[in-house]
Amino acid sequence: MCTILNLALAASAVVGMGSTLIMQEEAAANQRRMANYQADLAETQARQARYEADNTRKLARYEAGSMRRDFLRAQGEQRSLLAAGGVSMADGSAMDVLLDNASEARRREELRLYQGEMDAWRAENQSRSLLADVGLNRMQASQSRVSGWTYAKTGTSFMSQQAGAYAR
């Protein structure tokens, strides 16, 4: 009678430990899936940030070129108005006005290019940060796999000890 009771207790311990192991492995698998999902999401966001950086540079170059064309158009109009008025553009105040306008237009163009580079730099830094998160999430996924295996190994060792104790 004692032997049957011991066997029943051992079986109960094995079943209880087995269900605990299954739940722990499922929890580790869920953690692994979540970490992989977060890594995939961070990769997508990093690609988007790189695209944004490239697009920002292109837009800044386009806007700077547009500003330059607008300036050249305005400068041509100024020259034609000055020439129509009989003003000599070889030197003097008319030339100073044209040179000042050219200098200001160039400064605005360079400022726009600089702003574009700074915006692109911020987007690239965000991309690098997200890629670092990818590595961290992949590492967490790997650790959750290892923790599940470690718990399972510990649990099977414990079950063996319990079964051995009840068998005596």
Image: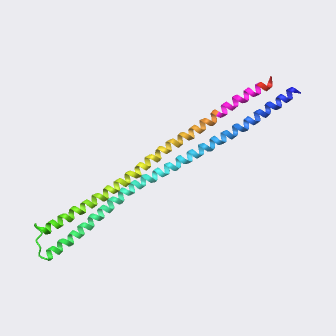
Asked if 57 appears above or below 132 in the picture, the reply is: below
Q: In terms of secondary structure, what is the magenta stretch mainly? A: helix
Which residue is rendered at x = 31% and y = 55% of the image?
114
Displayed quadrant of residue 166: top right
Which residue is rendered at x = 17% and y = 75% of the image?
81
Quarter of the picture containing the C terminus is top right
Residue lying farthest right?
Answer: 1
Tell me: 39 left or right of 159: left
Tell me: 57 left or right of 103: right
* Magenta highlight on residue 153: yes
Asked if 166 appears above or below 44 in the picture, the reply is: above
Q: Where is residue 9 in the image (x, y as percent from the top left)?
A: 81, 31
Displayed quadrant of residue 31: top right
Quarter of the picture containing the N terminus is top right
Q: Where is residue 152 in the image (x, y as percent from the top left)?
A: 67, 34
* Magenta highlight on residue 103: no
Q: What colour-coding does the image apply?
A: rainbow
Q: Where is residue 20 in the image (x, y as percent from the top left)?
A: 71, 38
Magenta span: 151-164
Which residue is rendered at x = 21% and y = 61% of the image?
103
Q: Position of residue 120 (x, y in %)?
A: 38, 53
Tell me: 46 left or right of 33: left
The mark total stands at 0
Which residue is rendered at x = 61% and y = 36% of the image?
147
Asked if 84 appears above or below 109 in the picture, the reply is: below
